[in-house]
Amino acid sequence: MATMLAGRLEISSRKFGVREVPVPDPGPGQVRIKVRAAGVCLSDVHLIDGTLTPLFLETPEVTLGHEVAGEIDAIGPDVPDRWHEGQRVALEAGERCGQCPNCVRFRDPCLQVRTRGVDYDGGWAEYALAGQHTLIPIPDDLPFVQAAIVPDAVSTPWGAVTGTGQAQPARPAGVWGAGGLGVHAVQLLRLIGAAPIVAVDPLAAARERALEFGADLALDPGDPTLREQILALTGGAGLDVAFDMAGVPPVREQAVSCLGLGGRLVLVGLTPKPLTVTDGIGFSYRGQHLLGHYGSQPGAVEQLIELARYHRVEWSRSISGTFPLAEAATAVEHLERKEGNPVRLVLVP
């Protein structure tokens, strides 16, 4: 039996290791991908440290990795002819359950989204299986390392910016946390014409990076004049929309205080901590909104790949480093320690 390297996590013990496992064979409607690049996300760190737990995993362990790009290596039965061996693809980060009434009758997104590398085996491996409906063709001039991060690091803020947050051209927007999600939110806000764009991060290097990605102003959250500076920049109006990319409770309080009339705070960063709004009366009086966000809507990754195809956006600056698959644990440690203040680290099998 042919074997391959894979980064496996045992859920009960949270023990992670890269080891040999059998190469999988594609079933009906599936293809096998020769993985060329797989992103390392903070969610992977949280799976290993136990902060996050799979909801739908049916096995005691799982291959991590929900950001994946590669080439079709083998095709299973009942796969449409438009897919062929050698084709360059990125993989959606998850798929719908396919069983509940929303999925079966209405073809609408449901809450039972199974995440690749969480609820079933992902792409921290030499080969990975993918349902044919999760494949997205990528252009020849889009590097695999960039294509791999689109299904989460880029599509999640894209969904928050264009969907949940409804950011608008020539309207002020703020991003709290300029890491892997936040810096892409800044880039995408710039792309759609939001203005001005304010980035907030405690790290000087992250603030500088946010300016390079398109922010008009970058502030330290510890700056006692932060709110006053934002009000001055927006002519006293405050922010139309703010995005919490950090998942830190104090961030939310600060962001709410910078919102204008009808302003929206979109919660993208995940935290188990309670949600609180200190000035509840003011929040209601100003008609403000608190919105949760997770992932992206169907079609988001395709939109971003098309934008890359026509060179409207690119992510070369987002790749902070690459590691061999065998060194996946080291990559996780680097991200956990924020060594080098990375945007995205990528495993290259």
Image: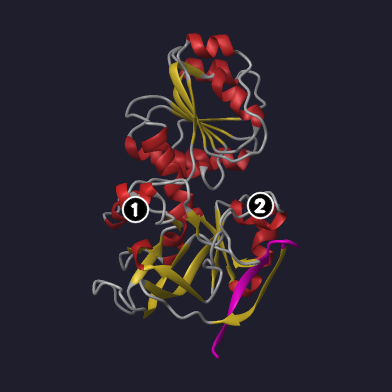
- Image point (52%, 77%), residue name: 126
- In the rendered view of the protein, which quadrant contains the N terminus? bottom right
**Quadrant location of residue 59?**
bottom right
At which x and y percent is residue 3? Answer: 57, 85
Q: Where is residue 91 in the image (x, y as percent from the top left)?
A: 41, 63
Task: Kindly state the secondary structure of the residue where label 2 is placed.
Answer: helix
Q: Is residue 9 magenta?
A: yes
Q: Position of residue 5 (x, y in %)?
A: 59, 78
Q: In this view, does 264 lie to the left or right of 337?
A: left
303 up-or-down from 244: above or below: below
Which dot marks residue 85? none
Disc number placed over residue 104 in the picture, else none? 1
Name the residue that disc number 2 marks: 46
Q: What stretch is highlighted in magenta?
A: 1-14
Give the SS element for disc 1: helix
As shown in the figure, which amino acid type bears the numbered disc 1? Answer: Val
